[in-house]
Image (cartoon, grey):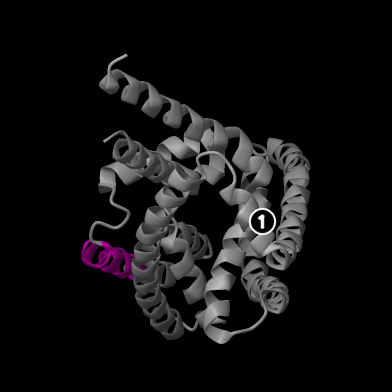
Amino acid sequence: MKLTTKLYFQKTGILLAVYLVLRFLLPLILPFFLAWITVGALRFFQKKIHIRLTALSIGYILFFLLLFGVSIFCGCLLLYEPCCRLMPSCQEYWAQFSAYLTWLPESLSGYLADAMPTALSCLFGLFLYLISVFLFARDWEHFHRMLCRLPFALPVYNAGQRIIVCVKGWIRAQCRIMIIISLECAAGYFLLNVPGFLFWALLTGMIDALPVFGTGTVFFPWAAAAALQGDYTFALWLGLLYLITWLTRELLEPRLLGDGLGLLPICFLMSVITGLKLFGALGLFTGPFGVLLIRELWHELENVSS
C-alpha cells in the first residue's frame, strides 16, 4: 500500500474515532472530563501558590457551591419584580386570545414533564463533577501516570498541548471583549434604572461570549416584553444598547481574536452548526473542539509519517 493511501486511511480512522468519542463516549464521561480539566487548571495555580492540590480542590468546590447558590438567589430576587410587572400584561393578552390558546396549558405541562428528568440529570451531573474534582485532585499523579500508559498517549498529548495554546488565546480575547461589553451594558442598565444592573450586565456579557448566541438573546425578548407592557421608550433604548454591543463585538473581534483558534470564521460557524446537529446543545463546544482535535491529530500523524 502506498504511503499516501495509507495516510488517507489513517486520517479517515482518526475522523471516525473522534466522531465516535464525541458522539457516544463524551456524554457519558462529561462530568469526569470537566473535572479532569478543572484539576489540571488548579494544578497550574498550585505551582504558583504552593498549596496542596487536595486543599485547593476543596476550596474550589466550596467557592463553586457558594457562587452557585448566590447566583440562584440573586437571579430569583431580581426576576421577581419584573415577573410581577409583566404578569398583568400576560393575563390581559391571555384573556383576549384564550379561545385560540387553549392548547398551551397541556403543551406546557407536557414540556415540564419532559424537562424534569433532564433537570435532575443535570443536578446529578453537577454532583458527579464536584466529587470527581476532589478525587482527581487526591490521585492526580497516579491517574496521570495511568494515562501515559495508554496507546496513542503521546500524539494525543502533543495535539492537546497545541489545542490548549489556541484555546487560551481565544479565551483571553473573548474575556477582553466580554469585559468591554459588560461595562457598556452596566452603563446602559444604570442609566435605564435597571435593578441589579451589575448582575445583568455581567450575565449579558457572558451570554454574548457564547458561540452563536450574542447580546440579542437577552435584548430581543427583553425589548419585546417591554413593548407588551406599553413601555416603548424602554424597548427603544434596549434596541440602541443592543446595536452598540453588536458594533463593539464586530469591531473588536477581528483585532483581538486574530487567527483565534486557527479556523476561518465560516469554518468555525460550520463546526458549531454541525456540532449542534450531531451532538445537540453540547455541540456548541464539541463541534469546534472536534475540528481542532482532528486537525491536530492529522498534523501529528503527518509528522510521524514524514
Q: In this view, does 214 lie to the left or right of 111?
A: left
For the point 39% across and 76% down, the residue is 179
Q: Name the residue under label 1.
A: 143
For the point 64% across and 59% down, the residue is 35
Q: Quadrant of residue 195?
A: bottom right
The reply to whether the magenta stretch includes residue 81 is: no
Name the one closer to the observer, 16 or 148. 148
The x, y position of residue 23, in whole percent, is 56, 34
For the point 65% across and 72% down, the residue is 75
Q: Quadrant of the N terminus?
A: top left
Q: Is residue 141 above or below residue 152?
A: below
Look at label 1 and name its amino acid: Phe
Q: In this view, does 37 lie above or below 7?
A: below
Element marked by disc 1: helix
Name the one closer to the observer, 226 or 271. 271
Number of marks drawn: 1
Main secondary structure found in the magenta portion: helix
- Numbered range of the magenta stretch: 241-257
